[in-house]
Image (cartoon, grey):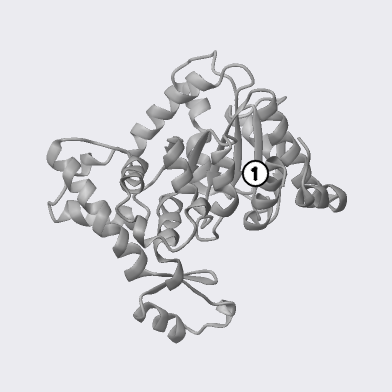
Amino acid sequence: MSKGPVSQFIQHHYRHFNAAALVDAAKGYEKHLLEGGKMMVTLAGAMSTAELGVSLAEMIRQGKVDIISCTGANLEEDIMNLVAHSHYERIPNYRDLTPQEEWGLLERGLNRVTDTCIPEEEAFRKIQDHISKLWKDADAAGERYFPHEFMYKLLLSGVMKEGYEIDPKDSWMIAAAERNVPIVVGGWEDSTMGNIFASYVIKNEVKATTMKSGIEYMVWLADWYRQNSGGKGVGFFQLGGGIAGDFPICVVPMMYQDLEWHDVPFWSYFCQVSDSTTSYGSYSGAVPNEKITWGKLGIDTPKYIVESDATIVAPLIFAYILGW
């Protein structure tokens, strides 16, 4: 496909070091798709609050993302930005804040993520009012769903549509819901909505079992991988580290080593974008070859690592793949 000005720029200027690795990873991603492969994208950190949806949503709409793994925070924060964007506050001098100034933000209901404050009342509570009804209705009906399935129901119902504060085309969760892209959310309990759900369990307003668990996510993922890893196979595009990446990548050694299904192919492309550098015991900063020893990647799996800020790198890689 013909390439637009952003793609032309990075190909001309990004020639060495992390810049060259960015271009190599983008070309590898594109090649993987052109050869019939599928791709998982994993979202760690605060990618949604960084508004990665501006580029990721179009990747999803164009069928260049087949499955997503994300933290519970990323699952909810894209929707928070969707309905409360005008109430967010950016604080460029966040490094200079005193403890007293941080406390002042708390008292104003502003929860800070680096230079961006999420407005608790407008974001968390607005979603809580609607999602809690879905939880309680499912609980009463004896139904069980995954965390992302409840979020999809919320978005597709349209109950919050009149309150959207950004163009919905920039929401990756809306794009994913409309295409019913599968999402895996390991450790969903470690999120604001997860904490809120736990509070309802403590108050005996819902049963814990109404929310499907992380183990059930892994079991589901094993089946999905078996059904989709034929041919060119499934690639793994990891933004950041942590559970969003470690949880799903382990499905391959789990099937091979623990279930002894020796016909399971390795992940067929791997890229990690992270500013975590290699150090003792760091999984996020481990070089891709370390994953060979864990039965996650093969000797010949194309491997890329871009040691840089994912909020800078990912939109550029997505732009290249989209031909921008």
Question: Mark 1 packing: few (<14 Cα in 10 Å), some, or many (20+)?
Answer: many
Q: Is residue 305 left or right of residue 177?
A: right
Q: In which image quadrant can residue 287 be found?
A: top right
Residue 306 locus on image (x, y percent)? 71, 48
The residue where tag 1 is placed is: 272
Question: Which image quarter is the N terminus in?
Answer: top right
Type of amino acid at the residue the image marks with label 1: Gln
Judge by depth and name the residue closer to the eye, 245 or 147. Answer: 147
Judge by depth and name the residue closer to the eye, 33 or 263. Answer: 33
**Picture residue at 48% right of the left edge, 44% below the top:** 175
**Picture residue at 86% right of the left edge, 53% below the top:** 13
Q: In this view, does 166 lie above or below 148?
A: below
Residue 209 locus on image (x, y percent)? 21, 39
Judge by depth and name the residue closer to the eye, 144 or 11. Answer: 11
Q: In this view, does 55 lie above or below 98?
A: above
**Picture residue at 78% right of the left edge, 38% below the top:** 2
Q: In which image quadrant can residue 37 be found?
A: top right
Residue 182 locus on image (x, y percent)? 44, 35
**Picture residue at 54% right of the left edge, 47% below the top:** 57
Q: In this view, does 306 lie to the left or right of 282?
A: right
Q: Which residue lies furthest to the front in this view?
A: 162
Instruction: Provide the secondary structure element on which disc 1 rests.
Output: strand
Residue 247 locus on image (x, y percent)? 47, 39
